[in-house]
Structures are given as structure tokens and as C-alpha cells.
Image (tube, rainbow, N blue to C red):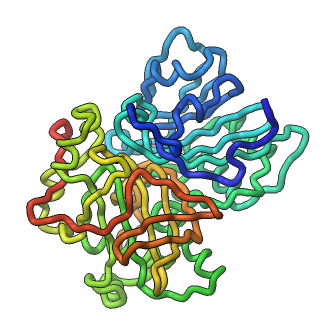
Amino acid sequence: MSDRLEFPDGVVRVTPLVGVPDSQSISLSTLLDAQHLLSALLTSFIINTDWLLSHIQPHTPLTLIANQAQSTSSLHQNISWCKPEFVVPNMQIMHTKLMFLVYPRHVRFVVLTGNLVEEEWTVVQNSVFIQDFPLDYTRVFSANEFSTSLALSLHDLSVPYSVVARLNHVDFTRARARIVTTVPTGGKRVHMNMESYGMLRLAHVVDQFNTQIAEEWEPDARLYCIGSSLGKLDTNWLRDFYMCAHGWDPQSLALNARASIVPENMIDIAVAFPTHSDVATNVYGKPAMQYVMAKQNVYENPKFPKSCMFRVQPRVNRTVVHVKAIVARTGERQNRGWVYLGSHNFTPAAWGRLQRGESPYYNNYEMGVVLLDVKYECRSQDCVSKIVWENTNVVLPFSPVWVPYGRSDAPYFNPDIQ
């Protein structure tokens, strides 16, 4: 195996679609490189273990985390299931989608928007962030912001110390992405780090970036927020998120003060979600439809901000996008900003809800990365044609095009969820 790192600076790829040649996609087999894989930590909301294990050699030690542990094939005995802390097991969920892959001379850090099930690597399209880092067991490297965030994130997931300790021997010098996580409220760990999760963590990351470039508070961002699950949104929550997306923690302000600083007509958020016609006419049929989650009673709630609903334009026509992402455009020319990719759907359960006079409430385990100082090439004010981060093109499974729902449009309501 070559000592050369394949992804030394971090890249964004898409998952493949059956029958669609795509040089920008990466298959699970390529990502895992099972021939050289020594051990792996794999987390996902759901894991099809038989399908996953068909991509991994039987002797490879695996640490798996899912929302619910599952039985595994008798052909692969070297598996350890890890269980995160849940205070309210029937409500709180483990939604983090992470890979930490160990090879002889490097590790591979991967953040996914999709689960470890076959359909999400064949008939719906997701995003994959990948970066390789040198590994040297003869050295102990100095910690930096990235390695510290990763260690805390793994600790929050109750990952065994033997796995976390390996980070000491990894050189994370070239890490540029920022990690954003969420941990459910009520556990032992979340009380110590309440300000370090969800939208408040996002605010901290963006504020650091604004400080570096001497950016002052100005509610000028345009956010394109796409997910595969539609949450219980309202104007107050959108305003809080919008302020955090500018690097401002709104907790110290009363609701009326927040509303005076950012009136409703200034909340520039596009909630992108596939319509019924988008999903119903997809070329892969029902296998792809099952991964879009929306309830009609949520959308029909009088407080739901229907005016913020926008269309999704898949990179491949007539396909379903399962990605969770935020494209943030800032500044007078709207040609720079940041991008989020990860497991967070654009929902209060994922990003948290700020509660007046109380600590924030978080429901899920989530993880993603924020790519700062992104450059945009735009065909028009409502269309981003190219995204560049660290001199590398950011390939997404959708085109950030600001097209609002028409009068006859409605989200696809999944009949299989209650």
C-alpha cells in the first residue's frame, strides 16, 4: 500500500446511483478499501449489517453504533456494538453518520449524510466528506481544534477509550473542516457542554470565522437548507437559527428583542424539500421513496412557515436526494460563505430548540462538518453554479437553486410513518 494519502486536504463526493456513470461519486467499497483496513468505527441511524459486512473482510475489528443494535452474521465475529446514553429512549435517537477508518499508516475520517443500507448507496443520492490523516504510533501529536472536537464527539457517543486514544497518534495539522455535533438533553455529558452543540455550536464556528475576516454582524445571509425529514418548524425557530448562522447566540435576548433585530421578512431561509411529484416520479420507484420523511399534520400546522418551502433540483434528474446540507451565502455580493454537510436534518430535533429562561433542548445525536470560507460562482442571484472550498470543487447531489414551491406543490408525505 502506498504511503501517499488519497484525500489529504478533504473532499466532498456523492454516493453512486445504479446505472448512472459519475466520476464524482465514490462507492462504499472504494471508501472502505477493505484490503488494507485494519479496524473501523462505523455509526449510522440504521445499519444493514449483512450488506455492510459483505464489503469488509471477516477478520477486521469493527465498532458499530446504530439507533438500535442488530444481530450480525455469524461469519463476522469481531464486532463490538457500542450504545450511547439515552435519557428518553423512546424519543431520543442516534442519528450520527460517521466513519473512522484505520489503515497501516493513516486514518480516514468520513462524515456521511446517508445510512449504511444498500438503497442509500444505489437509488438515492447522498454526500460524503472524506479526509485522510497520517498515523504514526511512534509519535504523539499536539492536539488542535479539530482533534479535540473529534475526541469529545467520540466520547459523547460512548466510544471505547481504546478507539479515542488512537487520536493521539494522528497528525490532524491539515484539518480545515469544523465539527458540529448534537447530543440529547438530559445525559451526564450534555450538561457540561450545553453551549457546544447544535445551532449554538454552529454560531460559535461561524463567529470565529467572522472574527478572522473582520466581519461585523449584518443579517445578510441567504440559507438554502435541505434535508430528508421535515421538522416542526415555526418562525421563532427559524429566526433563532438564522441568527446563529451569522455567528450570534440569541439566548440572552427576549423573543421580542430578537424579532426587532431580525423581523420575519428578513429571515432569508429556503427550506428545500422534495415535492410529492418529485418523489412519485423518481426513476427508482418505491425503494427510493421510503427515505423521504414528512408528515402532513406537521406541514398543515398553522404555525408552519409554508412560505419558506423551496424546490429541490437533483444533480441527476428524476432522482431522490437524501442529503442534509446548508449552503450559506453571505456578504453584499453573496459569492462567499460556508457549507454544512452531515447528519443534521433542518429540524429542531437535530439542531436544538432554544428555550426562554432554560437550557436548550436537543433530541438527537448528530454530527456534521462546516466548510468555512467557501467561494461561490453564481449564474444569478438565485442560482449557484459552482462551490469551491480550499481550492477544491464541492460536489453536491443537488443544485442550490432558489425556486419556491408553486401553489399546487406540497411535500411528499410518507404513508409509512405515523
Quadrant assignment, res 235: bottom left
**Residue 157 image offset from top left, x and y in percent:** 55, 43
Quadrant assignment, res 179: bottom right
Quadrant of the rendering where the C terminus is positioned: top left
Camera sees residue 11? yes
Q: 97 or 7: nearer the eye?
A: 7
Residue that appears at 25% across and 60% down: 311
**Residue 334 image offset from top left, x and y in percent:** 45, 79
Camera sees residue 357? no
Position of 50 with respect to 98 (left or right) is left
Position of 352 with respect to 110 (left or right) is left
Residue that appears at 33% across and 52% down: 314
Q: 365 or 97: nearer the eye?
A: 97
**Residue 89 image offset from top left, x and y in percent:** 37, 39
Q: Identify whether 315 is placed above or below 119.
A: below
Q: Identify whether 307 is placed above or below 112.
A: below
Position of 359 with respect to 297 (left or right) is right
Total labels: the figure holds 0
Seen as rendered, the residue at the extreme right is 138
Quadrant assignment, res 380: bottom left
Residue that appears at 44% across and 65% down: 385
Seen as rendered, the residue at the extreme left is 408
**Residue 56 image offset from top left, x and y in percent:** 59, 21
Residue that appears at 50% across and 71% down: 376
